[in-house]
Amino acid sequence: MKKGLKALLLAALAMAVLFPVLNCKKEPEEISVRLKWVYATGFAGDMVALKKGIFAKNGLDVTLHEGAYNLDPIKLVASGSDQIGTAGADQVLLARAQGIPLVVIAVVFQSSPVVFIAKQESGIKTPQDFVGHKIGIKPGADPMPIYEALMKKEGIDRTKLKEIPVQYSYAPLLEGQVDVFPGWTTNECFQFDKMGLKYTCVDPREYGIEPYAMCYFTTEKFLKEHPDIVEKYLKSVLEGYKWTFENPEEALSVILSFSEKLDTAQERYLIGAMKPYILDVPDEKIGWMERSRWEETQQVYLDAEMLEKPLDLDSLYTMKFLEKIYK
């Protein structure tokens, strides 16, 4: 009797020990992500992945933070406050030049949507037509190095231009204070179409100026310590972008749910407007990177004298996760 009771007790104890193991569910891994700017369609991959449960499906608990003038993704990721961020390729290049150990894991916007806009009545259609006109410039902002690279490549003497600093408002163009305004196809073009303004765009891409734009990055430390999280995150985001283009109207509803400030018509326009910038990759492998394109991108910022010397591109970005995801 004692032996039987002892065996029963041992069996019960074994089950008590094993039961939590057999029934435990792995907790999702937490990660904090910092966007380059406020919630908008450009970050649809993250927004859709969060709201449609793609992150959760891949075992992640993601907190998605907006960016702002005083919330720099570079600084916040470098400090460890956030683990992954989005920023312009130029920002990451400059950070690496300053010794900040960031690594790009994907480039979503394969080229910049920066264009130089003029009223149709001005007759300005090419960079050469800028000569003798008032040109709006944005020192310190995304369009500036692209403008400088375009002027240099086209051999335009900038002393023959009247360069006038402008802010984000396009009022100077409407009011005639400038003849050319540096804007984005994903913003000003929508606004001008809406108001019925006849305009022309000088697109730097048509002149071979195609630097990489928005990319996803993390730190060398986080990449080394948590490669599994980085892979799950990137896989989820890429799936989110793909789903957005396959289901644009449903994706629009998801995007609008993030902020009451978003304009339905503009966000719908943006889904279509950003598509060629994101899908301009072999076999529509969203986020894909090429060494030659990184070299071209770096050259734009060397020409603009934002970089003093070439960087070690091998440490700037990694194809490890993209190659695994798209194998």
Image (cartoon, helix red, strand yellow):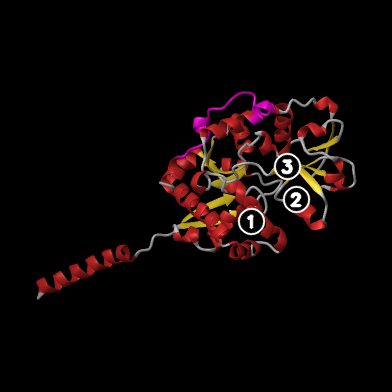
Q: Could you tell me which secondary element the residue under label 3 belongs to?
A: strand
Q: Locate residue 208 relative to residue 246 in the image: left or right.
A: right
Residue 70 seen in render = yes
Q: Earlier in the sequence, mark 2 or mark 3?
A: 3
Name the residue carrying label 2: 189
Place of residue 168 in the rendered image (x, y in percent of width and height, measured from the top left):
79, 46
Q: Earlier in the sequence, mark 3 or mark 1?
A: 3
Name the residue carrying label 1: 271
Name the residue carrying label 3: 115
Q: Which residues are magenta?
A: 300-319
Place of residue 142 in the rendered image (x, y in percent of width and height, measured from the top left):
70, 39
Q: Is residue 317 magenta?
A: yes
Of 134 and 282, nearer the camera is 282
Q: Amino acid at mark 3?
A: Val
Which label number is shown at residue 285?
Answer: none
Q: Amino acid at mark 2?
A: Cys
